[in-house]
Image (cartoon, rainbow, N blue to C red):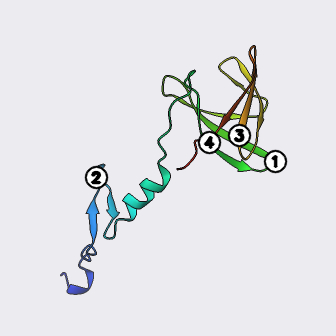
Amino acid sequence: MLTDKIRPRLRPEGLVKDKAGDTAEDADGQNAKAEAIATVEAPLALDGLMLLGIFGKEEALNALVRLPGGRVEEITAGGELQGRRVAAVTAEEVILQGPGGLRRLSMPDAA
């Protein structure tokens, strides 16, 4: 026999379904605010490489780079990216070494 004590609780007010169907709290526009802060419009470089982010421990940083076709690769110093050697990954930039010399990839400026 069921009693009131074991009934499921109702969903809290203010929860809405997002576009993907997940439940998200957006009562005061927090999702839109986070999206605006995290999104920076920047032109693609001529060769299509774009640095998306740098992460990891200071002594072993990794970087995410968007390739011309849209694929994203994780790289580390000493690795290779499109025929170029990854000379360094610093907190500010990635330095690639290739036939044309050094190429620096830095994060787009947040305006």
Question: Looking at the picture, how far across and down is residue 53, in whole percent?
Answer: 61, 43
Percent of width and height locating residue 35: 42, 54
Q: Earlier in the sequence, mark 1 or mark 4?
A: 1
Q: Within 10 angstroms of label 3, few (less than 14), some, or many (20 or more) residues?
A: some
- The kind of secondary structure element at disc 3 is strand
Label 3 near label 1: C-beta < 8 Å? Answer: no
Q: Callout 1 environment at 10 Å: few (<14), some (14 to 19), or many (20+)?
A: few
Residue at image location 26% in from the left, 77% down from the top: 9
* Image spot of residue 63 (x, y percent): 66, 39
According to the picture, the residue beneath numbered tag 3 turns out to be 93
Numbered disc 2: secondary structure: loop
Q: Amino acid at mark 1?
A: Glu
Asked if marks 1 and 4 touch (Cβ < 8 Å), the reply is: no
Q: Earlier in the sequence, mark 4 or mark 2?
A: 2
* Residue 18 position (above or below residue 63): below
Provide the residue designation for mark 1.
59
Measuring from the top left, give residue 90's x and y in whole percent. Answer: 76, 43
The reply to whether callout 4 and callout 2 are in contact (CB within 8 Å) is no
Earlier in the chain: of badge 3 and badge 2, it is: 2
57 or 30, which is in the foreground? 30
Q: Is residue 23 above or below residue 89?
A: below
Labelled disc at residue 21: 2
N-term-proximal mark, 4 vs 3: 3
Residue wearing tag 4: 107
Query: Which structural element holds mark 1?
Result: loop
User: Which amino acid is tagged 4?
Assistant: Met
Asked if residue 109 lies left or right of residue 2, the reply is: right
Which is nearer the N-term, disc 2 or disc 1? 2
Amino acid type of disc 2? Gly
